Each structure stands twice: as C-alpha cells, then as structure tokens.
Image: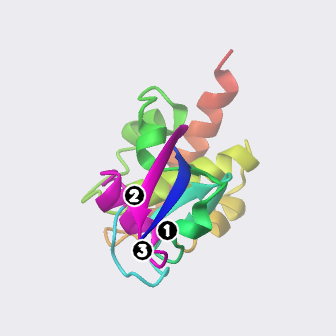
Amino acid sequence: MALYKLEVNGERVTVDVDPETPLLWVLRETLGLTGTKYSCGEGVCGNCTVLMDGEAVRSCLLTAGDAVGKKILTIEGISRETDHPLLVAWREEEVSQCGYCQPGQIVAAYALLSQKPDPTDSEIDEAMSGLLCRCGTYPRIRRAIHRAAELKRRQP
C-alpha cells in the first residue's frame, strides 16, 4: 500500500492503495464516487471515462499513481451544477434510457465542449466514437451536445 495525494473534483484527497490499483477502483471503492461505471475493464466501452487535466481518459486503464499531480473530474464533479448546459440538454433531449453509459458519455461531451464550443457533427462523432451505448441513443447524444453548445453560447 502507498499514500497518494490526488485532486478529484476540485478537492485534494489522500488515498492509501496498492500502487497497481486502477484509478476506477480508487474513485469507486476508496472515494465512494460510484458515478464512474465499470463495464469492460479494458478501456473499450468508455463507461469509466473521467477527465484528467481536461482530457477524457479511461479510468480502468490508469493507476492511482498515474493520477498524482493531475486534476481529475468525474461525473459527480460535473453533476453538482444541475443547471450546467450539458445536463440541461441531456434531460431536454431525453438521452438516457438505461443510463449506465451516461456518466462516461457526459464526461466525454464535457471535454469536447471545453475544447470545441461549437462542434460539428463529425467532431462530435469523432469525440464520442469510443463510447458504447447499448441502448443506441447516439442521435440523441449528438442533439444534446449541439443543444448544450447553444445553451452555453446564450449564457451571460
């Protein structure tokens, strides 16, 4: 076991975990942030997506040590702002069906809109291409991202 100092959702935390512990399990089991989902464990599905220094990454492929000195943002950090344009758009477009993939989808969309405030369809498709949705809500996801971009532009 080793002590790691992390910054998660704007808070500094210290965790005592094995050096090889995946960041996903640190978030879920050690810190109780269960919004980040486990699914494939191989970085293929995207359900475990979090932001690391603003970049969408798969937390199942990273260790606690990989996160030291980085700013980690999870769905819990985003969802504190229930009026965030992305969350409003997600609800308005009724994106969620089963909801399992939605935390990873929202985090990836958040990263996209942070880098490209008015993305094209192809930019959205590229940014979201590695995230699997078993319910097939991809057209709604794209509409929600466009709507969120529009809502962000209207903000003062």
> Residue 151 has which mark?
none
**Image location (x, y in percent) of residue 19:** 49, 75
Q: Is residue 24 magenta?
A: yes
Q: Contact (CB < 8 A) between labels 2 and 3?
A: no
Residue with the mark numbered 3: 18
**Image location (x, y in percent) of residue 123:** 71, 61
Residue with the mark numbered 1: 59
Label 2 is placed on what type of residue?
Leu
Residue with the mark numbered 2: 27
Label 1 is placed on what type of residue?
Ser
Query: Does 113 sit left or right of 14 as displayed?
Result: right
- Could you say whether the residue bearing mark 3 is in a helix, strand or loop? loop
Where are the magenta residues, as a range? 9-36
Count residues near mark 3 (Cα–Cα under 10 Å), then give few for <14, some for 14-19, many for 20+.
some
Label 3 is placed on what type of residue?
Asp
Which mark lies nearer to you, 1 or 3? Answer: 3
Query: Does 153 sit left or right of 72 as displayed?
Result: right
Q: Is residue 17 visible?
A: yes
